[in-house]
Amino acid sequence: MGNSKEAKILVIEDEPGLAQLYQLVGKGVGLSPEAFAVVDSTADAEKLLGENPDHLPQLILLNLHLPGEYGLTFLQRIKEKDSPLQHIPVVVVTAEVFPDVKKRCQDLGAADCLIKPFHIETLRETIQSLLPRTSPTE
């Protein structure tokens, strides 16, 4: 896990292989491994964010099926009006194939929803397009 004070992308993913893939794709767009903070549950994400409220990520990659809380519940909570995370783009990554999953994610405030398996190029383009839209955390 990268230093959370340096992290630009918060990865909430319980599959270590996918978290590593995100870091590899990030390297392809000029991000170091330290640009990523990886946690495997929303509870760990909230703990990390609470420890570093002055160093919020510029992007969140969120898996829906996590230990404990369902990803959409977390997404809904962080996109509420009074949340300090409200303006951070969230990309939901899921294996759900329900026809309305993308719409549900977007209705709750996700910037994008990638359905597994996805093309690596799609993930790279998504990361590249969303990072410039955010303000630096430093």
Image (spheres, rainbow, N blue to C red):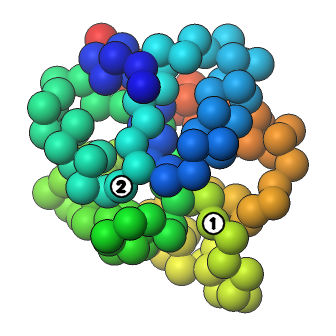
Placement of 70 over or under 135, stated as above or below:
below
Q: Residue furthest bottom?
A: 99
The disc label shown at residue 94, or none: 1
**Circle 1 SS class:** strand
**Percent from the top left, x then y, of residue 10?**
42, 37
Placement of 27 over or under 11, stated as above or below:
above
| Of the two numbered discs 1 and 2 in the rendering, the one whose residue sits closer to the viewer | 2
**Percent from the top left, x then y, of residue 31?**
60, 15
**For the residues marked 1 and 2, what is the alpha-carbon distance in whole angstroms?**
14 Å
The disc label shown at residue 41, or none: 2
Instruction: Tell me what residue is drawn at x 29 percent, y 46 percent.
Output: 45
- From where the camera sits, is residue 70 visible? yes
Crowd band around label 2 with a 10 angstrom C-alpha radius: few (<14), some (14–19), many (20+) = many
Crowd band around label 1 with a 10 angstrom C-alpha radius: few (<14), some (14–19), many (20+) = some
Instruction: Tell me what residue is drawn at x 61 percent, y 59 percent.
Output: 93
Instruction: Tell me what residue is drawn at x 76 percent, y 19 percent.
Output: 28
Q: Are marks 1 and 2 in contact (CB under 8 Å)?
A: no
Q: Quadrant of the N terminus?
A: top left
**Circle 2 SS class:** loop
**Is 62 or 80 nearer to us in this picture?**
62
Mark 1 or mark 2: name the one nearer the start of the chain.
Answer: 2
